Amino acid sequence: MSIHTRLTQLFKRNVAFEWAIEQLHTPAGYYLCQHTLVDQYPDLSPQEKTRLLSKINELAEQTSPFSAPVSRQDWRRLEQRLSRQT
């Protein structure tokens, strides 16, 4: 199963993660993502966890603290970029 497929499944099942993504512009955003998605899914391999956290961090870095919160559409764009890389 590709990381994109697994990420899509996790995203659909996890409302808390959706909220965490929307909060990436806050200091706690990365922490929220890590603890609402990565840590609660032990079936992700260490490589998948590292890659997912890297992509979350990438999105957080692209988001200015003075910009609008990261939207679901922003996350879908990141998900699409990730799927093209696999």
Image: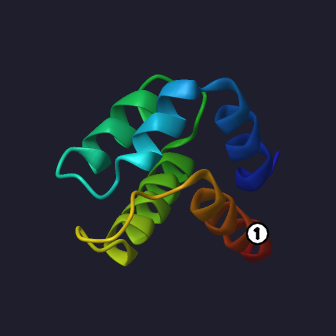
With respect to residue 73, does 9 lie above or below?
A: above
Q: Nearer the viewer, residue 66 or 45?
A: 66
Residue under label 1, please give it.
Answer: 86
Residue situated furthest left in the rendering: 27
Left or right of 76? Residue 42 is left
Residue 7 horizontal/vertical position (percent): 68, 45
Residue 36 horizontal/vertical position (percent): 42, 29
Left or right of 45? Residue 24 is left
With respect to residue 43, does 58 lie above or below?
A: below
Residue plotted at (30% across, 49% down):
30
Q: Nearer the viewer, residue 43 or 66?
A: 66
Q: Nearer the viewer, residue 10 or 62?
A: 62
Residue plotted at (24% across, 71% down):
66
Left or right of 33? Residue 44 is right
Q: Residues within 10 Å of mark 1 (few under 14, many from 20)?
A: few
In the picture, residue 75 is in which quadrant? bottom right
Which image quarter holds the C terminus? bottom right
Residue plotted at (76% across, 66% down):
83
Is residue 14 among the parts visible in the rendering?
Answer: yes
Residue 45 horizontal/vertical position (percent): 56, 41
Residue type pointed to by label 1: Thr
Disc 1, SS: loop
